């Protein structure tokens, strides 16, 4: 078969050689063929006929119209589903090997007659104009803190023009997480872009039937920084595509770096945060050129950050508790009946009274949970020991497992009332003196199988004698000769 290359060579040789026969021979074709292409003045590819006829009978010609009508009614039908339907309605007519033929026919129908597909339009970004952010879960990376699984999110901030990025560890898509993450990124950036785009977070974007576009708190946040708020359309994550794609690249970079590190475990939260900080710096190092362009046009930061918290005015109940965001927290019993101001931050809450902070409490994640600090109520519990056994939050009054073991031991030796009274004396001692010292005293008493009483614990606490450290473990010296004996015995058995 003559190729385009041969014909091009023929045309070139015809200018040099005296006869067509010589030019044809040197180009590797017959003289008659050479004369044909000289007359046509075209390449073989230009005169080749398109294959428009069928080489096999169309097995679906008689049923294609009904297939087409079904596709018009529901374009999402798969060829395999349609094929199974044909086999069911026409037994023995269609063999499994014909499925591929129908798949090709359906594919051609989708490309020529089917519904139009969504078109994605490449965007042109200007430096310093837009920033995007979103939350991404890190749970699939199986990161642990002190050997305990660390489930968390990352608030991810990206500048689409330069791809500069930053992130903040958080645990929910709350407004507090959004506010802290956005402000952390802007202050690390050192300037403010013109607009901020987010997905349809309920903490930032109102429902479609609401007259206001954004929530009051989110409006206040972007107004503080002079940002124009933008949101994506419902079910259109591609409109926030740069940060969505950055999620994948960032988590892949974390995964690869953890592989090189050889461990996914970190000693504490701060070590993990430092690890992420170094990784962000490495990722941003290769974007310096475009990032410098952005820095030149970013607007100045405000004089100070906006407080990233939610405020509540609540009254302390008779149980010395407050309810905040569907969770219960205890406060000092002296505040019972008083109205306090609670400031809810990402990971803690502050209780304010008389224009000062009186309590700082870890924030509970989720709803329907409780955090009761025994020091807040122990003074009255020792006066009302009968209330302990059926107290709604009793399990929160065992600071460590040894306190629980002590209470169980007391219940075996005494009546319910006396056991409660003795245990509350021990708990009161921990509140007034030192919880760790009381815990060590209980450890020693339990380890010696001694009788546990409040007096015995108090005596050990005030004796000043330090208990043996938990980490002191004595291991007998290993005699390697024992292995030789075992091997010798095995050899004897084998023989």
Image: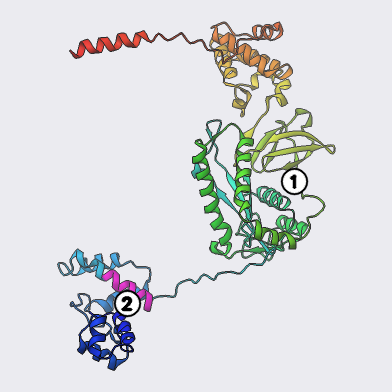
Q: Is residue 205 visible?
A: no
- Per the rendering, the mark at residue 437 is none
**Main SS type for the magenta part?**
helix
Query: Which percent across, then down, holds residue 1?
Result: 22, 79
Query: Which percent across, then down, holds residue 178?
Result: 66, 51
Q: Nearer the viewer, residue 495 or 116?
A: 495
Label 2 environment density (alpha carbons within 10 Å; few <14, some 14–19, many ≥20)? few
Query: Where is 454 relative to 206, above or below?
Result: above
Query: Which percent across, then down, holds residue 126?
Result: 66, 67
Query: Which percent across, then down, holds residue 17?
Result: 29, 88
- Which residue occupies the extreme bottom position in the image? 39
For this view, does 297 lie left or right of residue 201? right
Q: Label 1: state its secondary structure.
A: strand
The residue lying at 70 percent from left, 56 percent from top is 218
Label 1 environment density (alpha carbons within 10 Å; few <14, some 14–19, many ≥20)? some
Q: Quadrant of residue 418?
A: top right
**Residue occupied by mark 1:** 311
Q: Is residue 428 visible?
A: yes
Q: Nearer the viewer, residue 124 or 172?
A: 124
Range shown magenta: 102-113
Q: Which callout, 1 or 2, points at the residue further toward the start of the chain?
A: 2
Q: How many marks?
A: 2
Distance from Cα at disc 1 to Cα at disc 2: 60 Å
**Residue occupied by mark 2:** 69
- Which residue occupies the extreme left position in the image? 92
Query: Where is 33 relative to 478, above or below?
Result: below
Q: Nearer the viewer, residue 300 or 137?
A: 300
The residue lying at 73 percent from left, 16 percent from top is 433
């Amino acid at each position: 078969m003559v190729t385009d290359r041969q014909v091009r060579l023929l045309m070139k040789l015809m200018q040099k050689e005296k006869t067509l026969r010589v030019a044809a021979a040197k180009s590797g074709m017959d003289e008659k063929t050479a004369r044909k292409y000289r007359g046509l003045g075209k390449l073989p590819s230009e005169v080749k006929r398109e294959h428009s006829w069928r080489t096999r009978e169309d097995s679906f010609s008689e049923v294609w119209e009904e297939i087409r009508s079904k596709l018009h009614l529901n374009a999402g039908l798969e060829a395999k589903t349609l094929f199974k339907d044909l086999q069911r309605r026409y037994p023995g007519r269609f063999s499994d090997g014909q499925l591929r033929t129908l798949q090709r026919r359906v594919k051609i129908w989708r490309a020529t007659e089917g519904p139009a597909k969504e078109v994605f339009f490449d965007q042109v970004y200007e430096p310093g104009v837009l920033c995007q952010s979103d939350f991404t879960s890190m749970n699939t990376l199986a990161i642990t803190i002190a050997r305990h699984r660390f489930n968390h999110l990352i608030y991810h901030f990206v500048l689409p023009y330069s791809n500069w990025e930053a992130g903040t560890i958080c645990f929910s898509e709350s407004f507090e997480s959004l506010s802290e993450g956005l402000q952390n990124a802007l202050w690390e950036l050192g300037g403010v872009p013109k607009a901020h785009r987010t997905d349809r977070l309920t903490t930032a974007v109102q429902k479609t039937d609401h007259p206001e576009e954004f929530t009051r708190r989110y409006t206040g946040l972007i107004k503080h920084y002079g940002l124009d708020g933008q949101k994506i359309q419902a079910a259109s994550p591609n409109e926030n595509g740069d940060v969505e794609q950055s999620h994948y690249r960032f988590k892949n970079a974390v995964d690869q770096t953890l592989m090189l590190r050889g461990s996914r475990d970190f000693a504490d939260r701060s070590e993990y945060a430092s690890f992420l900080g170094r990784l962000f710096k490495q990722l941003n190092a290769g974007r310096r050129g475009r990032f410098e362009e952005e820095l030149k046009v970013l607007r100045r930061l405000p004089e100070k950050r906006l407080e990233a918290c939610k405020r509540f005015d609540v009254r302390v109940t008779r149980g010395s508790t407050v309810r905040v965001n569907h969770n219960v927290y205890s406060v000092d019993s002296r505040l019972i009946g008083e109205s306090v101001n609670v400031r809810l931050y990402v990971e803690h809450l502050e209780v304010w009274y008389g224009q000062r902070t009186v309590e700082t409490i870890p924030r509970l994640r989720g709803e329907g949970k409780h955090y009761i600090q025994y020091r807040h109520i122990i003074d009255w519990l020792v006066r009302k020991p009968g209330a302990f056994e059926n107290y709604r939050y009793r399990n929160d009054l065992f600071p460590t497992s040894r306190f629980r073991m002590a209470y169980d031991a007391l219940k075996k030796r005494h009546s319910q009332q006396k056991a409660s009274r003795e245990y509350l004396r021990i708990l009161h001692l921990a509140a007034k003196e030192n919880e760790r010292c009381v815990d060590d005293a209980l450890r020693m008493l339990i380890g010696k199988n001694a009788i546990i009483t409040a007096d015995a614990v108090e005596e050990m606490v005030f004796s000043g004698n330090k208990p043996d450290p938990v980490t002191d473990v004595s291991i007998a010296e290993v005699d390697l000769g024992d292995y030789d004996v075992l091997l010798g015995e095995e050899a004897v058995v084998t023989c």
